[in-house]
Amino acid sequence: MVGRRKEIEELMKSYDSSESEFVAVYGRRRVGKTFLIRNVFSGKFAFQHSGLAKGGMKKQLRLFVSSLREFGRTPSRSLTDWMDAFDELKEVVRASDLPKKVVFIDEMPWLDTPRSDFITALESFWNGWASARNDVLLIVCGSAASWIVKKLFKNKGGLHNRVTRRIHLQPFTLAECQEYVRERGLSMSKKDIAECYMALGGIPFYWSHLEKGDSLPQNFDRMFFADGAPLKGEFAELYSSLFRKTKLHLKVVETLGKKKIGMTREELLTYVKIASSGSLSQCLEALEECGFIRKYKVIGTKKKFVYQLLDCFTLFHFQFLCEMDGKDEHWWSRTNTSPIQSNWRGLAFERLCLLHVPQIKAALGISGVLTNVYSWCHAADSVYPTGAQIDLLLDRADNVINLCEMKYTSGPYTIDKAVETMLETKVETFRVLSKTQKALHLTFVTSRGLVHNSYWNTVQSEVTLDDLFKE
């Protein structure tokens, strides 16, 4: 298995525990939650079941009965509610001769249908029975991270503080994607892997569609643009599987996708035109918990936040796939060297960097330094007619701020007189407007490094694409 070392260690600790454990594994759709659990506990399940997408309580209970039968239990009567279902589950556990009874319930949020009282039955099963034993490992899983957080982690009733381990499964990093590519025998350069990440993010399921023998453009044509392309309908399925009411979530991500640096909550309220600010807050929280957006403070303030869309696949969809039906099946290969793809790579590289801040910090030798991560923008005005924008600021506790410029080029990036002047103006604008007293270090994060010419001395530190591939 590629990566997931910390997660596997946590799961094995729960398995080896001398007490019953309640483990929640959550993360966005297609990130590999089910694959991880089934591989770690293969042959050790006392019971496993998966919720049915968009199924009512009757269908969910009917499917639960099928799972009970697979593990040797045929109920003597039909199940009328979840209390009955969990009573039958107890009998399955009692009958198991495994030393640790691993009970795996996948896609649990789908089981909690309206007026089903599922949470009440789960609470009764765990508090009233399983937790009193020392041999039960209950693992629950779900792509709807907001449901896991709200109904389990922030539960104010009987399930309050009952989850013993929380495992938030994150997308692969560049290093893990490189390991995955090698394991599958794919021949891809670091440039290919980086550009693939710019479109797919670190979602293993998407990477599983890459095929040997094809170039990256050929793979993209087959995955996105050909007739019957396997990822053609993924965007709609992605959001509908995570959120029961997707209209607002889609409106928010579409709006955020149009402003690279992000928007404040107040700006979003204006653009989205929603009457209830509470609904927007819940939507933003859910999108953040699922990993689609990030929230960062406006530098120099304590309470003002900006929300920024970072999900690579969502942004790729908005730029290239919304109107894909009008493009030919070889569109990506035909436009591979076009300005539209070149511009996309430049912007997507900036997001790639934002998703690999720990690797940037490691390259700078500041992994152990407390650091706040920001972006910053000042619109053009009469005092600063050109305006200024910095997409990545590392505000460090050791009295330094790294102002990061991110450049994706086919060869080493050259700083000339015009670029030097622009950089000096940007740094000075930030210094004046932020009123910071910290040292400002101009840092370049590039795909192929910098040309060390006479203008290079303005740069304090460099990070390259190779650094982003380090664990």
Image: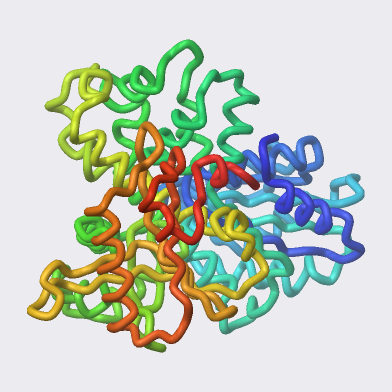
Measuring 59% from the left and 73% from the top, which residue is drawn there?
A: 153
Q: Is residue 114 above or below residue 73?
A: below
Measuring 12% from the left and 27% from the top, which residue is drawn there?
A: 326
x, y percentage for residue 429?
26, 76
Left or right of 229, for residue 255: left
- Between residue 352 and residue 307, name the one nearer to us: 352
Q: Residue 50, can we see it?
A: yes
- Between residue 137 and residue 442, name the one nearer to us: 442
Left or right of 45, for residue 338: left
Left or right of 257, for residue 215: right
x, y percentage for residue 382?
7, 79
Q: Is residue 110 above or below residue 202?
A: below
- Between residue 250 and residue 3, name the one nearer to us: 3
Left or right of 170, for residue 265: left
Quarter occupied by residue 176: top right
x, y percentage for residue 426?
28, 68
Quarter occupied by residue 81: bottom right
Q: Is residue 262 above or below residue 40?
A: below
Quarter occupied by residue 41: top right
Quadrant including the N terminus:
top right
The mark tally for this picture is: 0
Q: Residue furthest top?
A: 213
Q: Residue 238, can we see it?
A: no
Measuring 57% from the left and 83% from the top, which residue is drawn there?
A: 156
x, y percentage for residue 232?
30, 31
